[in-house]
Image (cartoon, helix red, strand yellow):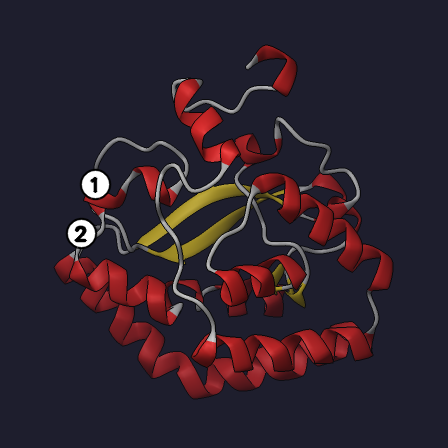
Amino acid sequence: MIRLMDLSISGCAILFLWPIMIAVVVLSGVFIGLPPIFVSERRGLNGTVFRHMKIRSMLAGPQRGRVFFELDRINWFGRFLRSSHLDETPDLLHILAGQMSLVGPRPLLLKALEPVDGSVRQTVKPGWTGPAQLWLLRRGLLSKELQIRLDNHYVRRRSPMYNCRILAATVRYFFFGARLNLSPSATPDRITYQNNGFEYLPKNQS
């Protein structure tokens, strides 16, 4: 049932949004740089690594792994892409291909999982939205530890009906949610990340 919902919604969304997706890719190449598609390795179902695509929203420069430490690399068009979530529209292709689901834990960069136990969240496909993403839309802020707890909570409650509720809430909070807090000192894990020289380390090594 969940896979059928993924196929039908992502397929319809691609048919409706493909002209916008192409236009955004072209504009990203013009205003941000080439290549307009950013590809990174993410961990999916059962720990399988897949190549995840996003429309480029950041200028070239040193990569520190988290957007709140790279604000100097985001220009006006990048801010527009991120606030509108248009940079995430390639997720629809991953959903159609079966690498992702509409609802589930966000596909994190490989090194982003190093300090925490991500084994539970990897028992389901990564998703475009989920309880952790909803928290971020509502509050504008999300720590790594809370994200993992919310991801694990989703895995325990996962069902077609629960997914429909999360999708409906995502649409609602997309328009009326809080503004994203990108302060580098907004959460303890961001501060720890800076103190570690922008590297993810287990807590007993930090």
Separation of marks 2 and 1 at Cα, in angstroms: 8 Å
Residue 3 figure quarter: bottom right
Left or right relative to 27: residue 162: right
* Residue type beneath disc 1: Ala
* Residue type beneath disc 2: Gly
Tell me residue 41's x, y (percent).
Answer: 51, 40
Position of 15 relative to 119 (above/below) = below
- Residue at the image position 58 percent from the left and 50 percent from the top: 107
Helix or strand or loop: what does disc 2 sit on? loop
- Residue at the image position 86 percent from the left and 57 percent from the top: 156
Tell me residue 77's x, y (percent).
Answer: 20, 63
Quadrant of the rendering where the C terminus is positioned: top right
Numbered mark located on residue 60 in the image: 1
Numbered mark located on residue 160 in the image: none
Marks 2/1 in contact by CB < 8 Å: the verdict is yes
Position of 33 relative to 16 (above/below) = above
Tell me residue 37's x, y (percent).
Answer: 33, 55
Helix or strand or loop: what does disc 1 sit on? loop
- Residue at the image position 79 percent from the left and 55 percent from the top: 153
Position of 203 relative to 8 (above/below) = above
Quadrant of the rendering where the N terminus is positioned: bottom right
Residue designated by label 2: 33
Q: Nearer the viewer, residue 64 or 176?
A: 176
- Residue at the image position 61 percent from the left and 27 percent from the top: 114
Q: Earlier in the sequence, mark 2 or mark 1?
A: 2
